[in-house]
Image: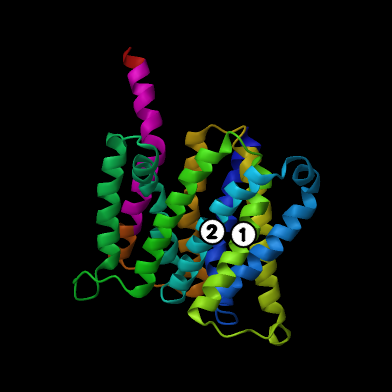
Amino acid sequence: MWAWKLALAACALLWGGSFVVIKGSLDAMPACSLMALRFLLASLLLGAVCWRRLRDSLDGTHLLAGSILGVLAGAAYAVQNVGLTYTTPGRNAFLTAVYCVLVPFVNWVIVQKRPGATSLLAAVLCVCGVGLISLGDDLVPSLGLGEQLTLLSALLYAVQIVFVAKFAGAHDMMTLTVVQMAVSSVACWGFSLLLGEPATDLSTLDASFWWALAYMVVLASCVCNAVQNVAQTVVPPAPAALLLSLESVFAVVASVIFYGEQLTPRLVAGFALIFVAVLASELGPTLVRRATAMRS
């Protein structure tokens, strides 16, 4: 099992690094167009690798469920990366991680499952963390456009995750993933047209852009999604969530090293509170169940 735990930590590292990679690529291509190209290539690559599963599983229900997930994921990625245009990779990563805290509350709205006490505690910690991040140098709360869009994307991710849970039991997940990525590409192209993003002449892009795109498509999209799907059949949910939550930490480290993001004590405190909130949201229910079982 330790090998799969290490693999999940590697996924968190690759996803964390992708924030800096994407930030650099936004200078060459607008956000929605970039995500559309990313998911188009990822769906073609993953579809080629999993073509037998697609042949055996793809039907109307998979197309419908995958389309719903694709629209939600496409919207989330598009909004998140437009937000990344206006903020730093570290802030974008930690504010995106708020989706972990939002999931129990979105689940409450959609499937009527009331969140527990640990979810409420996580929500309070998360609000405090976002509050610290939003404070300007004059200590007046102010969330810029980038931060606001990132929080909206976190809500969209939370909704998408709840629907993944609804669809998972009756569908082949790799087939759903391929359909989701293909529809996400279409959704991102739609957002690109809606926002009036200028067309990018691909022939003018240099090698650094294509290496960054390869990172996003092969590693951050195909490899990480496949490894996560397999690893979580072996690693229990609690340690898996803990390992994957390191994504935001790795993103800040990468942002400081490669992007030159400046960290103040206030920002570090805000990041720490959001990270603790994520841990409380992901691990709290499991710990409560174990404590209850030990008492009984």
Q: What residue does disc 1 label?
A: 183
Q: Quadrant of the N terminus?
A: top right
Q: Would residue 253 be found to the left or right of residue 22 on screen?
A: left
**Crowd band around label 1 with a 10 angstrom C-alpha radius: few (<14), some (14–19), many (20+):** many
Figure colour scheme: rainbow
**Crowd band around label 2 with a 10 angstrom C-alpha radius: few (<14), some (14–19), many (20+):** many
The CA distance from mark 2 to mark 1 is 6 Å
Q: What's drawn in magenta, residue-wise?
A: 271-293
Judge whether 75 appears above or below 202 on screen.
above
Q: What residue does disc 2 label?
A: 71
| Residue at 25% over, 55% down | 128
Query: Mark 1: which amino acid?
Result: Val
On whether residue 223 falls in the magenta region, the answer is no
On whether residue 272 falls in the magenta region, the answer is yes
Q: Reading the chain from its start, which is encountered first: label 2 or label 1?
A: 2
Which of the 4 image quarters holds residue 5?
Answer: top right
- Measured from the top left, where is residue 85 in percent x and y? 46, 76
Query: Which is nearer the eye, 168 or 14?
Result: 168
- Measured from the top left, where is residue 168 in percent x and y? 57, 38
**Contact (Cβ within 8 Å) of mark 2 with mark 1:** yes
Secondary structure under tag 1 reads helix
Secondary structure under tag 2 reads helix
| Residue at 64% over, 49% down | 63
